Image (cartoon, rainbow, N blue to C red):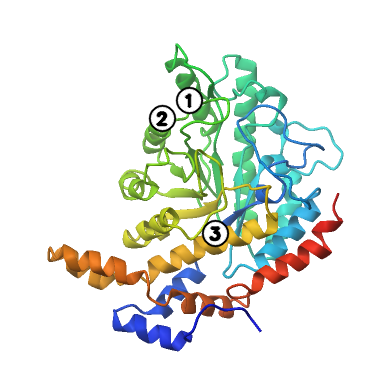
């Protein structure tokens, strides 16, 4: 028998929502056609498959923990993703980094990658009718050992990373064309300074020139969309990051690009939700990397918490879902990695469902009439509406386990599959 914490049926929950002017069927339809892009790097601690071993130095990327059973090969990673997807309701996407190339024993550097190195991933997604998103990998490489890539003062090193970015845009476009769904190709670099720099301007000038070169070729938006991603600081760039929020926001506005908001890339007291309606006044769309920053960009697993709910509420209230691409970006090696995917993706979906089930009509009426007492009251009352029964119905229709039941399946997978990996 499925574990459940709900005491009422979906039909009874629907009646409760109808009384406050909310149609759960409409919410479920919207939820079912809103994909979440699952990030491949949760399954192997951002290692990739270009070479054996741990991450190379350079790039401000660090996964912590040593839970047994991490994926060691592309096939193991795809097997783990399949298991996670079987426990996540809805229909979703795969988010892939360039360091997950499959070289087949060949010696090939990142600036020479083509779709061939990712064909197995495309075939896997096609078989599951999934779209793909893609990321150049500007870290964990001998030419990123000092933490500098597109801002590097050495023009030859900078040229290598420009070539990598160009190659990845072409790969992303071919992925989108092959799968019939546009790939979001997202650019993030780690470049910055551990201590106070004297010259903050020159690296940003080099970054703008590098991005201009990478993005010079126009690509059909039906195949690929370009996004740029900022960061407040990272490991080795605590005092200065060239690709700051202000830099990339200005660049995205000037060049009509998607802007990527990563929930871990801002000060803990900043509201990511508040930025959404402001930025979407000026850029064509957003890419979201949803994670949970605890003290810094710690990339903890997403939860059904106030910051995540706030992000989804803003997307629904502003009618921004059609202009937003939702992805995840956490990597926790301290817990079962498959469970991390399931917990985080289900939490993001529950947060979106909660936003879709808000008593919007009552809140709008109260606000437009200046009745802020009723507005606050309905914000609070909405928290105890029977969301759980609607969530269980979504899981049932998706033929995935409802509350609690998926945990048993993950533990069995851990015992029967993950425990056998050394």
Q: Is residue 333 left or right of residue 403?
A: right
Task: Give the camera-side residue of 199 and 228.
Answer: 199
Left or right: 293, with 140 as reference point: left
Q: CB under 8 Å between callouts 1 and 3?
A: no
Q: Is mark 2 on a helix, strand or loop?
A: helix
How many labels, in total? 3
Label 1, label 2: how many angstroms apart (C-alpha)? 8 Å
* Residue 34 shows in the view: no
Q: Quadrant of residue 123?
A: bottom right
Front residue of 131/347: it is 347
Q: Name the residue under label 3.
A: 36
The front one of 201 and 62 is: 62
Query: How many neighbours does mark 2 have within 10 angstroms: few (below 14), some (14-19), or many (20 or more)?
Result: some
Tell me how far mark 1 sits from mark 3, CA to CA: 29 Å
Neighbour class for label 3 at 10 Å: few (<14), some, many (≥20)? Answer: many
Discs 1, 2 touching: Cβ within 8 Å: yes
């Amino acid at each position: 028998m499925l574990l459940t914490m709900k005491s009422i049926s979906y039909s009874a929950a629907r009646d409760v929502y109808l009384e406050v002017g909310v149609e759960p069927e409409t919410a479920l339809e919207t939820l079912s056609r809103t994909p979440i892009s699952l990030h491949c790097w949760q399954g192997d601690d951002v290692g990739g498959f270009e070479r054996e071993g741990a991450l190379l130095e350079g790039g401000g990327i660090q996964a912590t923990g040593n839970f047994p059973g991490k994926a060691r090969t592309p096939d193991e990673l795809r097997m783990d993703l399949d298991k996670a997807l079987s426990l996540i309701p809805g229909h979703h996407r795969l988010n892939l980094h360039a360091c997950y190339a499959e070289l087949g024993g060949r010696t090939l550097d990142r600036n020479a990658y083509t779709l061939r190195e990712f064909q197995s991933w495309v075939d896997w997604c096609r078989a599951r009718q999934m779209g793909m998103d893609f990321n150049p990998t500007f870290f964990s490489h001998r030419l990123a050992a000092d933490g500098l890539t597109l801002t590097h003062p050495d023009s030859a090193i900078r040229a290598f990373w420009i070539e990598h970015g160009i190659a990845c845009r072409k790969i992303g476009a071919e992925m989108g064309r092959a799968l019939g769904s546009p790939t979001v190709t997202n650019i993030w670099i780690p470049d910055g300074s551990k201590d106070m720099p004297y010259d903050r301007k020159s690296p940003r000038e080099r970054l703008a020139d590098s991005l201009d070169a990478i993005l010079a070729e126009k690509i059909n938006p039906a195949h690929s969309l370009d996004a740029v991603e900022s960061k407040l600081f990272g490991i080795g760039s605590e005092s200065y990051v060239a690709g700051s929020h202000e830099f990339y926001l200005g660049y995205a506005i000037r060049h009509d690009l998607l802007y990527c908001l990563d929930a871990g890339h801002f000060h803990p007291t900043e509201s990511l939700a508040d930025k959404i309606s402001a930025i979407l006044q000026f850029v064509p769309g957003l890419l979201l990397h949803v994670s949970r920053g605890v003290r810094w960009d710690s990339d903890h697993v997403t939860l059904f918490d106030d910051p995540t709910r706030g992000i989804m509420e803003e997307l629904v209230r502003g009618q921004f879902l059609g202009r937003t691409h939702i992805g995840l970006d956490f990597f926790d090696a301290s817990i079962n990695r498959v469970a991390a995917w399931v917990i985080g993706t289900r939490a993001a979906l529950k947060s979106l469902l909660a936003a879709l089930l808000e008593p919007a009509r009552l809140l709008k009426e109260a606000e437009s009439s200046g009745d802020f007492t009723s507005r606050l009251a309905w914000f609070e009352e909405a928290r105890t509406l029977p969301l759980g029964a609607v969530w269980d119905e979504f899981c049932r229709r998706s033929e995935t386990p409802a509350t609690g039941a998926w945990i048993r399946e993950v533990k069995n997978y851990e015992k029967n599959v993950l425990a056998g990996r050394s």
